Image: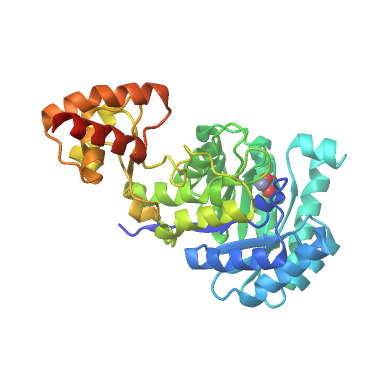
């Protein structure tokens, strides 16, 4: 069966950079954009050009250096935003304008004090302005997660007719459950007559920790683009994390999808983004956390040392991580202790390890982690007593 390509739309430099404290200068943005291109992302959302002169310059400079990926600029459904974005993107080999407007009743009333029909007209108009300036236009229906499906389908049909070639269905507030988000995508596939003329995109936020699950549910139900960020950075609790979707699609070949992501770059790039944005990655973060390939309980360590596949579904090399770690704590067992002594060059037999294990536990109970220095001391004093 031929596999379907999932387009990876990276928004680390736009939604990710909106995080307080993560602001980047133009040089930093260019360097990250070049690495994202090397990683294999299909679309780089480089910024929101009208938002500041600095962001305009960043989008403009990124447009000059990116060779293969599409470079995208965000706008509101405002003519000046769209014209400024087109100007910022003028050197891009493949420019895309990403324009849109809130479509949930809450956004329509609270943000725009408008009616559904007025918003529909503004959406159509925005796509037409953008289409006059670039071929590749993506429309976002902000807060689509909480938008009535019947109205959303009408908006999507109209913007495709006006020229949108990608339609983004953001769960802006991270509200949907995976089956609800999937049903929303399926509803659009089944109720928008011209949906075959556009790619459906998932843009999911992580307020309930469901961003990745919702994006995967979206592609299972017909979407073919995922908007995501390195380390899941983004407004509030963040966006779908790129490394998670890339590895889910790679691990679950049964889904029938592929991406162009070079997975060995995931950990190095995660560290670069974390350093440059000064935003640490939580240790238990999937794929790129420092504990993602660490084993510390006795049962797990014993199984892992017999066959790594017992407790690891991904080989760390495949995602550019350091090799798996056997961490020694008071919950570790004899196999792990013997393994770590062996790595330090000690030749202990089973009886030695039994005796050493009691010594080890005394140290382990007083510390969070027993390190090589502690083991050297335990090992050497054991040898001194036995000669
Ligand atoms: O979360 C969202 O709805 C957005 C749009 C601007 C695409 O970031
Ligand atoms: Zn967003």
Q: Colour scheme in the image?
A: rainbow
In this rendering, the count of numbered labels is 0
Residue 377 shows in the view:
yes
The answer to which quarter of the image holds residue 51 is bottom right
Above or below, comparing residue 106 to residue 75 in the picture: above
Would you place residue 152 above or below residue 32 in this image? above
Q: Classify residue 338 as left or right of residue 216.
A: left
Q: Place residue 43 in its image quadrant.
A: bottom right
Which quadrant of the figure has residue 138? bottom right
Q: Position of residue 226 (x, y in %)?
A: 54, 52
In the image, residue 333 above or below residue 97 = above
Residue 290, above or below 35: above
The residue drawn where x is 48% and y is 63% is 39
Q: Position of residue 269 (x, y in %)?
A: 51, 57
Residue 303 percent coordinates (x, y): 22, 34
**Quick check: can you spot residue 154?**
no
Q: Quadrant of the N terminus?
A: bottom left
Residue at image location 55% in from the left, 40% down from the top: 211
Query: From the image, which quarter does the C terminus lie in?
Result: top left
Residue at 79% x, 55% y: name it: 77
Spot occupied by residue 147 in the image (x, y as percentages of width and height): 68, 37
């Amino acid at each position: 069966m031929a596999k379907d390509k999932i387009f990876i739309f990276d928004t680390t430099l736009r939604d990710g950079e909106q995080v307080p404290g993560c602001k980047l200068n133009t040089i930093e943005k260019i360097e990250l954009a070049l690495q994202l291109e090397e990683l294999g992302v299909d679309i780089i959302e480089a910024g929101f050009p009208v938002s500041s002169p600095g962001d305009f310059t960043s989008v403009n400079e990124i447009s000059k250096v990116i060779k293969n990926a599409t470079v995208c600029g965000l706008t509101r459904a405002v003519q000046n935003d769209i014209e400024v974005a087109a100007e910022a993107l003028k050197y891009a080999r493949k420019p895309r304008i990403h324009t849109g407007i809130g479509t949930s009743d809450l956004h329509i009333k609270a943000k725009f004090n408008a009616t559904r029909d007025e918003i529909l007209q503004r959406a159509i108009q925005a796509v037409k302005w953008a289409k006059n300036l670039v071929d590749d236009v993506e429309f976002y229906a902000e807060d689509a997660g909480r938008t009535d499906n019947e109205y959303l389908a009408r908006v999507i049909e109209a913007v495709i007719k006006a020229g949108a070639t990608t339609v983004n269905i953001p769960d802006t507030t991270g509200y949907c459950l995976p089956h609800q988000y999937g049903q929303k995508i399926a509803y659009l596939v089944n109720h928008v007559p011209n949906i075959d003329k556009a790619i459906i995109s998932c843009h999911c936020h992580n307020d309930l920790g469901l961003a990745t699950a919702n994006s995967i549910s979206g592609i299972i139900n017909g979407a073919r683009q995922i908007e995501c960020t390195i380390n899941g950075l983004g407004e509030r609790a963040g966006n779908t994390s790129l490394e998670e979707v890339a590895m889910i699609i790679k691990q679950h070949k049964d889904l029938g999808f592929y991406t162009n992501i070079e997975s060995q770059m995931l950990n190095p790039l995660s560290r670069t983004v974390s350093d440059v944005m000064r935003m640490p990655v939580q240790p238990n973060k999937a794929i790129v956390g420092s504990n993602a390939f660490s084993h510390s309980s006795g049962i797990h360590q014993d199984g892992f040392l017999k066959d790594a596949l017992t407790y690891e579904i991904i080989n760390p090399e495949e995602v550019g991580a350091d090799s798996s770690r056997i961490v020694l704590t008071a919950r570790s067992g004899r196999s792990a202790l013997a393994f770590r002594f062996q790595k330090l060059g000690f030749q202990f037999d089973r009886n030695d390890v039994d005796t050493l294990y009691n010594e080890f536990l005394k140290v382990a109970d007083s510390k969070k982690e027993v390190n090589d220095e502690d083991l050297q001391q335990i090992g050497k004093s054991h040898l001194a007593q036995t000669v």
